Image (cartoon, helix red, strand yellow):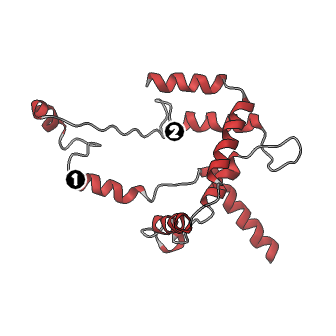
Amino acid sequence: QAWLVQFRAELEEMDAEDIAIEAAAVVAQLMERDTKLSQEVSRAWSDIMLTESLSEPLKTPPFDRLERVCEQLIVNDDNEIVSKQTPTELKSKVLNLFDKYFVQESKFRRAMSSRVYSQKFKQSYEAGLGQPGVLSKYDDIFDLKQYLSTWPIVPYWAEQSSKEKRKQQSLEST
């Protein structure tokens, strides 16, 4: 917890331009071209498998997932405008995301802790069995892993902007 508080302070002190540079590096890494056909096939099949357990309207694989994530990280360039987002706006988004999902007081925060007990601490292990939020059996962990793929893989604001773009495109085509 102390590390999260310290990291939040470091983020706040960080210059908006430095955050933009870091974001540009992440974009460059995400948009790096596949050098082997197997990499491209693996990425495509992972996108397909992520939607396999979803209901019919959501079964369309998000093949543009990385591009949509990158759209959220790209900022204005001095020479050409590629986005309407400034470095200061990006920093604000990063801080808001951190405050919403990582700060201890946030109602959206979800933390996972893993413990391995030795025979010496068998009583502590047994005391935790059956408590809410404690996964102690293989079946519990299997159930959790089954639903992990349905959690959002694109930031919520990207989903909203994508829906707005699709809505606008459908209005323009009519």
Viewed as shown, does residue 46 lie left or right of 72? left
Q: Foreground: 110 or 60? A: 60
Nearer the camera: disc 2 or disc 1: 1
Residue at image location 47% in from the left, 24% down from the top: 3
Viewed as shown, does residue 22 lie left or right of 47? right
- Residue receiving disc 1: 138
Residue 16 lies, in percent from the top left, at 73, 31
Q: Quadrant of the C terminus?
A: bottom right
Residue at image location 67% in from the left, 41% down from the top: 23
Residue 127 lies, in percent from the top left, at 15, 35
Q: Check disc 2 and give the amino acid type.
A: Tyr
Q: Check disc 1 and give the amino acid type.
A: Tyr
| Picture quadrant of residue 21 | top right
Q: Foreground: 174 or 119? A: 119
Residue at image location 81% in from the left, 43% down from the top: 76
- Residue receiving disc 2: 101
Badge 1 crowding class, 10 Å Cα cut-off, few under 14, some 14 to 19, many 20 or more, is: few
Badge 2 crowding class, 10 Å Cα cut-off, few under 14, some 14 to 19, many 20 or more, is: some
Q: Secondary structure at mark 2?
A: helix
Mark 2 / mark 1, whichever is N-terminal: 2
Residue 172 lies, in percent from the top left, at 82, 72
Viewed as shown, does residue 79 lie left or right of 92? right
Q: Secondary structure at mark 1?
A: helix
| Picture quadrant of residue 142 | bottom left
